[in-house]
Image: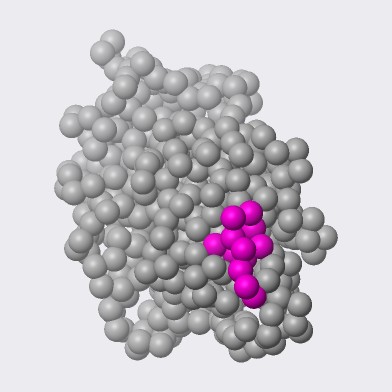
Amino acid sequence: MTSAAALLAVVGTTAADLPESATTATVNGSTTYQPIDGFGFSEHFGRAAVMNGSEGLSAQHQRELLDLLLSRTTGAGLSILRLGIDSGIQPTDPGGPNATPKYTWDGYDKGQVWLAKEAEAYGVKRFYADAWTAPGYMKTNGTDADGGTLCGLSGATCASGDWRKAYADFLVRWAKFYGQEGIGITDIGFTNEPDWTATYDSMRLTPAQATEYVRFFGPIADSAGYKVACCDSFGWSQQKAYTSAIEADAGARGYVSTHTGHNYASQVGSPLPTSRRTWMSEWSPNGTTWNENWDDGSGYDGFAVATALHDALTKGNVSGYVYWYGASLGATRGLIQMDGDSYHVSKRLWAMANYSRFVRPGATRLGATTPDSALKLSAFRNTDGTVTVVALNTATEATRVGLSLRNTGITGGTATPYLTNGSNSTSRQASIPVTAGSLTATVPARSLVTYTIRR
């Protein structure tokens, strides 16, 4: 579809022009679901340093990448930064769990401090710090990699002693180092994919062990002013066992502010068993080559990411959605590929942008229904009173829609569409009038359109 044709496809038509075959849709402001904390990304394992120019990225291109990820006017406007905690601040055993820790701090942390400061300048306020593992000498296997369990937990007895308190102090000290740099860490996760053994940083915890450590770490984190997130299982269904165990434990459940799960082993299909906030906290689709396409059937194009976002928000009721790499290297499934002083942008970025730029922290998801199963709708009320409706048309032909805005307080005004498909990247289209609480538009085939609606 050409840009001109796409423009004609999303501009509004009058109600009288709407054919009988057109679908209807309703947004109901009286039906409310989860609050929204935001959308985010990570640059762990040295990717932040690459973005900072360690592999030749110029200052101009660095700024362009930051704009693509963080700008609310020209980029995705991402609002959560996930930071990785590794053993760098205490790389060697101080002499046992009761010995005085030997911390070191370089004020850079593989580029993550620089990136956090840049993100804060764009307005990011949510900084989620997550540890893939405790330092190796605190674990049963003695190394950062290849799993192992924190010494002192049930079933994890070590000759070196009980490292539970030392690990809690380590996590808080890391967060306080960021505080010294002017970055207020908001959330701390003490484990990442505890049900997966990786050849790199990893640590195994059963649901019972994770719950046990929540009881131990929760009061320490709370006293230091940090929220606890848990447990970043490698699959959404697998996370349910961790969430269930925590919720069943009176001493643990109150200390977990956010239950977090990934989208790899199993994708989001239903809510986690908790009334607390939930985040899809890491995912990028499987794929072996760099892919910039919108809709090629590969499973790791922009359309696949748009579908996963819709499902997480509407089936899983997630309050946060954190993609894995914002920008990475080689055959990445990240949003952007860095290549020396060049970079390449995937349509995955613009799939994110159609949600993250317009659905802001503090928003509330509203009821959105349509009898057309090929049209995936979600709706949100932002704190400034605007309503955002996101429409993903999975059909192979354009869909005419008559949209009714019930109980939203919006009876007149305008709806501004932003279109993403093969030839558009969150591209602003001509505004559509809202009359008597309704509007009419056409969503192009295999396209994602976000409507920002103002009185």
From this view, report whether residue 131 is shown above or below residue 296.
below
Using the rendered image of the protein, determine whether residue 126 is visible from the camera's viewpoint: no
**Closer to us: 179 or 25:** 179
Check the image and tell me how it is coloured: one colour
Please tell me which residue is depicted at 76% across the width and 77% down the height of the picture. 98
Magenta region: 149-160
Residue 426 % position (x, y) = 36, 51
Image quarter of residue 4: top left
- Give yes or no for residue 218 being in the magenta stretch: no
Q: Residue furthest top?
A: 20
Along the horizontal axis of the image, is 256 left or right of 450?
right
Residue 411 % position (x, y) = 57, 24
Residue 151 % position (x, y) = 62, 65
Please tell me which residue is depicted at 50% across the width and 58% down the height of the picture. 204
**Closer to us: 448 or 110:** 110
Q: How would you classify the magenta stretch by its main secondary structure?
A: loop
Residue 41 % position (x, y) = 47, 61
